[in-house]
Image (spheres, rainbow, N blue to C red):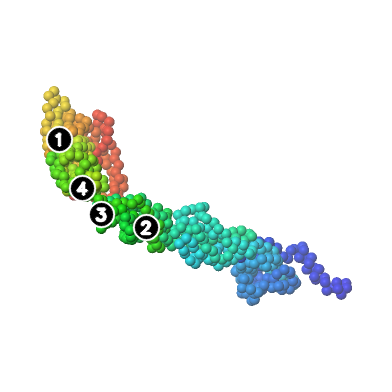
Amino acid sequence: MSHFGSRCFPLYCFLLFCQLKGCASLYYVTATVGADVSLKCSYNAWHHGPLPFCWGRESTSTFGCNNQVIKSDGTSVVSRLSWRYSLSGYLRGGDASLTIMQVQESDGGKYVCRVEIPGWFNDETTESIVRVNPGRPSQPLLSIRVIMERAVRVGWIPPFNGGRAITDYIIDVKKIYDPWSSAIRSWVKSTDATVVNLRPATTYNLRLFAVNSVGTSDASNVLTFTTKEAAPEGPPLDMQLQALSTKSIKVNWRPPKVELRNGVLRSYTVSYRDNDSAVQNWLHHTVAATGDPQSVILTNLKYSTRYEVTIQARTNAGLGPASTAPLCSTLDEVPPDPPVIELEDVTSNKIFLFWTPGFQGDSPITGFYLDYKAANDSWTSAVRSWVTGTRTSVADLHPATTYDFRLFAVSSVGMSKASNVLTFATNEAAPEGPPLDMQLQALSPQSIKVTWRPPKFELRNGVLRSYTVSYRDNDSAVQNWLHRTVAATGDPQSIILTNLKPSTRYEVTIQARTNAGLGPASTAPLCSTLDEASTVATTITLATTSPAAVTTRDTTFSPVPPDPPVLELEDVTNNKISLFWTPGFEGDSPITGFYLEYKEANGYGY
């Protein structure tokens, strides 16, 4: 063998061994610019223990690593080319994987991991081909620079571009409660922008996107801001002028449209001047913005003079445009004085009034406005009617109700001030409605319990004084009514009719009474007293841990009625109890239901 052959023979054997057994593993890894990427490499540390290894780029080497980026002695990093290269795996366990942080496009290419295995030509290599793709820009961070009445200036620091230059920024702006789908979108190239055409005193949301050739970033943080107030853009609405006297004019108006107020209305400036004077100086009156509608009375005016009036709304930013109305002249005649109204007669649903007119002023009185209302209502809800003469009546009133009445005299000059207020109550009437929820319950062969509730409140027509409970033997040939009077003391009420005949059907009615008489009767199905042989069943009491105890009493009787059921406790809470029961023998007729009674354990009776 030649000298050359003897020197190269081991190399040939090594290459042949690598071809047959395979000396390197090959991985393909794809990453996006800005992300972290991990390249796999490992060895059998359990067999060999911790071993030195290194990572290089582009090409392999017989010994060591070409273009080395990081080296380890098997337990820690010995050297590295940049802070972006790290070993994040468990080194003592044989994990030699390389992590490249914040990958750049220049990081693409071939990486080789070489683990130094003891012995000749035993080193293990792992190759990774890294492909780095550009990505979308990262999420921008947005901030407010200046807030104006109709615009906002925002700025931001350019985010990471993802490996491709940022070409545009997208700005979305919308009102706070609108969906993003309704946002107004604009495109800019700089790192600040002024968003215009906003409404004053309006709250908006604003967000930003960065765009490169790869795509669009995620949305930035959302800015929420309220534009500054501006002077109102619209005038006050529905302005009206009304001459009240020879020296006063009443001005009425409503606020500007909401979308034209441009902020919180603080006040109104009412300006007025004498239109008939040679020198027309404006006078001004400020009125606080307190409601809708509003009014002011201009006083100390000239007799029989035309006045021009304007109104402007004001926010903290200034005055808005003025509203105007036709010229209004103060009165040139004196209106009538108010009349004096008196009560002539009253019934349960009707009143008779008369009045004495006051001084008629400079023009004859042509009639009167009569206002009336329930005493607890405001005059804005009053019923108004036109009357003439000096007396009238008002019908269809509600019994036992207090009313207020007042009168205005009217002439061609105007309307007087209100008269004295006459307050009175209509008389009581008999109730119009029967007692409610009437129920009959046989207690024994000689007694029946009657329970009921008062009539509806609006049908009582006064204070309930008593109830008349009428009853008669429905099985007798002569059915004479018997009557019991019960004082009206509460809701509900009850009475026990006694000294009745056994096994007899009774008809019962109830009528409510006021001082004016009895109302209509309520009725219930006939109720039969019990047989003479009936006996009362026992009582079962269940104590609970709730604030109240529950007691049930079986109200059925034997042998003809059903046998009593067996009552049991199912569940109990601090304010509720659940019960179940097993019905007994039904007797001579199917059971139609049950009565459940309960009381506190220490209470008296049911």
Kindly identify which numbered label has been placed on residue 303.
3
Task: Looking at the image, tell me whether mark 3 or mark 1 is earlier in sequence order.
Answer: 3
Q: Report, in whole angstroms, how far the alpha carbon at label 3 lies from the one at label 4.
A: 14 Å
Q: Residue 535, position in %: x, y?
A: 17, 35
Q: Residues within 10 Å of mark 1 (few under 14, many from 20)?
A: many
Q: Residues within 10 Å of mark 2 (few under 14, many from 20)?
A: many
Q: Residues within 10 Å of mark 3 (few under 14, many from 20)?
A: some
Q: Is residue 569 visible?
A: yes
Q: Which residue is mark 2?
A: 312
Q: Tell me whether circle 1 and circle 2 mark residues in contact (CB < 8 Å).
A: no
> Quick check: 282 left or right of 221?
left
Q: Report, in whole angstroms, how far the alpha carbon at label 4 lies from the one at label 2.
A: 36 Å
Residue shown at 39% from the left, 60% from the top: 319
**Relative to residue 18, is residue 574 depicted above or below?**
above
Task: Looking at the image, tell me whether mark 3 or mark 2 is earlier in sequence order.
Answer: 3
Residue shown at 13% from the left, 39% from the top: 345
Report helix, strand or loop for mark 2: strand
